[in-house]
Image: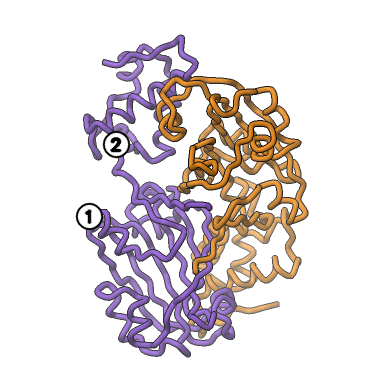
Chain colours: A purple, B orange
Amino acid sequence: MKVLDSTSFVPLYHQLKEIIIENIENNIWKPGDKIPSEHQLREQYNVSRNTVKKAIEDLVQEGTLYRVQGTGTFVNKPKIEQSLSGFYSFSQVLKDKGLRPKDILLELEQVKAPQKIASALQINKDEEVIMLKRLRCANDEPIILETSYLPVNRVDDLEKMKLVGKTPLYDILANDFNVVVSSAKETFEPVLILEHEASQLNVHEGSPALLLERIAYDSMRRPVEYCKSIVRGDRCRFYTELI
Amino acid sequence: MKVLDSTSFVPLYHQLKEIIIENIENNIWKPGDKIPSEHQLREQYNVSRNTVKKAIEDLVQEGTLYRVQGTGTFVNKPKIEQSLSGFYSFSQVLKDKGLRPKDILLELEQVKAPQKIASALQINKDEEVIMLKRLRCANDEPIILETSYLPVNRVDDLEKMKLVGKTPLYDILANDFNVVVSSAKETFEPVLILEHEASQLNVHEGSPALLLERIAYDSMRRPVEYCKSIVRGDRCRFYTELI
């Protein structure tokens, strides 16, 4: 068994973190496995309560481990990585990773646009929009809660939207409505998951999530979609390359 | 005073949200102002407890409002927007917005690289790195907790790093060490703020934050910096344009 080196310039909690990470990377501890308790780790590595606490806290924050109240600390599944640099189809990202995408249609209705959505779509407040709310899953695990708003003056057939789940939304827009999404503006901010989102995403209220808002434009730079997504932070990570 | 239209297809909580947003945009309620209590809003707009609760919850999640336990709900300052699409200097972003940047140097030492950082920098574990921990502020308000690791085989003078705060880090690297950062890989994930970060960032433990990890490369694509930032979610938003 590995021992910690108290004479090293690497802090002890950092050394302990790396032993835990190594155990996970070497498949000694697998996703869903319970790791030894804080007490056991203290005894095993002869370190203080604080050292163990800080190592575990860091790994929970980074999403490597997760806690279940009153039960223990467990190994998380690796996060799903998505690029921020270009257009990505969530379904394709999942397929590339060998995960099975599934979309559950939660709501589909024609509504009047509230001010914020009307502004994003450059239409008047109370003009009609199609509202499409989906739960996007990977291997039946809910990952993203996504609500799209499409202006009825461009997308005027609610029935065709029912194909979503079988056909990607942007393919339906292109094929059935001649609306080709060719650019987008996205904002990202970390938020806490609300009660009603928590039950749908199968996580606790107050869990970390990314709030992603997108305005998608056609080739004439006319807005054709406003979309708001709540992305589970314990299951997703985003990356970008800067050149 | 505005009234809510219960015959509209726009849900009542959405209508209430927009009235609150309008009041803020029209400067009737300013950053730091306390808004009416949930009870007052219920009476004023003749809506249910749930409608008020959902409107406020949404606005707190989006960062427009914040709650102070036992005191009330207040208007937040507008978030600082940063681009994800290219290199950005946080100090420059602040200056462009008329905010005063300030960096507080928290730690500066030469340490042995833990495995994770060594891998990122393509050096051996336990090789020496300079560790530079900064609190980055806007108008004296702490916003980002940032820790950079620089390999000593490229950046070998810890003293020169003390200029950080007066001179941007990448300018010091270029001018004093001939290390020109020319590309980077970044990952983003939403996390909850830990206890020790909370006190430095002056927010509550468990607040939403973005964990940003960057590996910066020189023009020969050799890694020259590994950087981990904790960014306050209540004060920052990121955006990108997809083309």
Say which residue label 2 marks: A75
Q: CA distance from mark 2 to mark 1?
A: 20 Å
**Badge 2, how many Cα within 10 Å: few under 14, some, many 20+?**
many
The percent coordinates of residue B177 (x first, y second) are: 64, 31
Is residue B118 toward the left or the right of residue B239 in the image? left
The percent coordinates of residue A148 (x first, y second) are: 43, 73
Between disc 2 and disc 1, the foreground one is: 1
Establish if B12 lies above or below A194.
below
- Front residue of A16 and A7: A7
Kindly identify the residue that appears in the image at 50 percent across and 66 percent down: B242
Quadrant of the rendered image containing residue B205:
top right
**Badge 1, how many Cα within 10 Å: few under 14, some, many 20+?**
few
Furthest-top residue in this view? A7
- Front residue of B175 and A218: B175
The verdict on a common chain for dots 2 and 1 is yes
Name the amino acid, label 2.
Answer: Val
Name the amino acid, label 1.
Answer: Gly
The percent coordinates of residue B11 (x first, y second) are: 49, 76
Secondary structure category for the residue under label 1: loop
Say which residue label 1 marks: A98
- Front residue of B170 and A232: B170
